[in-house]
């Protein structure tokens, strides 16, 4: 229900914004839309925000992933264990 009562333009969430079963009208900015379309826009924005956060976390962890794979290659590449002390 939260996605259906939140205005995609100004972000206000009020139960009064649902004029009818299928009608949405924001009392703050006057934006009008079909309630289903309004909910779809809000759900899309939330999904894109989650995707962006996951991609940022993946990029931030890249140096740690590279270091781990580097240790793995050194440890199992011909038994060279002396290089592990340098890492």
Image (cartoon, rainbow, N blue to C red):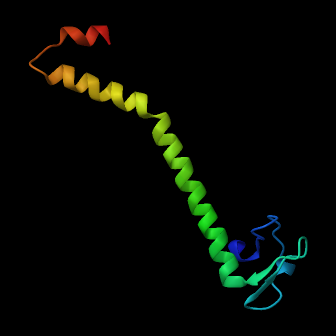
Going 83% across and 88% down the picture, which residue do you hit? 19
Up-down relation of residue 44 to residue 76 (above or below): below
Q: Is residue 30 left or right of residue 45?
A: right
All told, the count of numbered labels is: 0
- Which residue, as the protein is rendered here, is positioned at the far right? 28
Going 62% across and 62% down the picture, which residue do you hit? 46
Q: Is residue 49 left or right of residue 17?
A: left
Residue 66: percent from the left, percent from the top? 34, 29
Q: In this orientation, which residue lies closer to the viewer: 9 or 5?
A: 9
- Which residue, as the protein is rendered here, is positioned at the far bottom? 21
Q: Quadrant of the N terminus?
A: bottom right
Up-down relation of residue 67 to residue 81 (above or below): below
Q: Quadrant of residue 26?
A: bottom right
Q: Quadrant of the C terminus?
A: top left
Going 14% across and 24% down the picture, which residue do you hit? 76
Q: Quadrant of residue 64?
A: top left
Going 69% across and 72% down the picture, which residue do you hit? 3
Up-down relation of residue 56 to residue 65 (above or below): below
Up-down relation of residue 45 to residue 51 (above or below): below
Residue 8: percent from the left, percent from the top? 74, 68
Residue 68: percent from the left, percent from the top? 32, 27
Q: Quadrant of residue 71?
A: top left
Residue 82: percent from the left, percent from the top? 19, 8
């Amino acid at each position: 229900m939260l996605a259906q009562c939140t205005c995609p333009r100004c972000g206000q969430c009020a139960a009064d914004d649902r004029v009818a079963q299928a009608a949405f009208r924001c009392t703050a900015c006057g934006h009008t839309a079909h309630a289903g379309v309004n909910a779809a826009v809000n759900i899309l924005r939330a999904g894109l925000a989650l995707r962006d956060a996951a991609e940022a976390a993946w990029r931030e962890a890249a140096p740690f992933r590279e270091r781990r794979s580097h240790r793995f290659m050194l440890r199992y590449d011909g038994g060279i264990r002396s290089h592990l002390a340098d890492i």
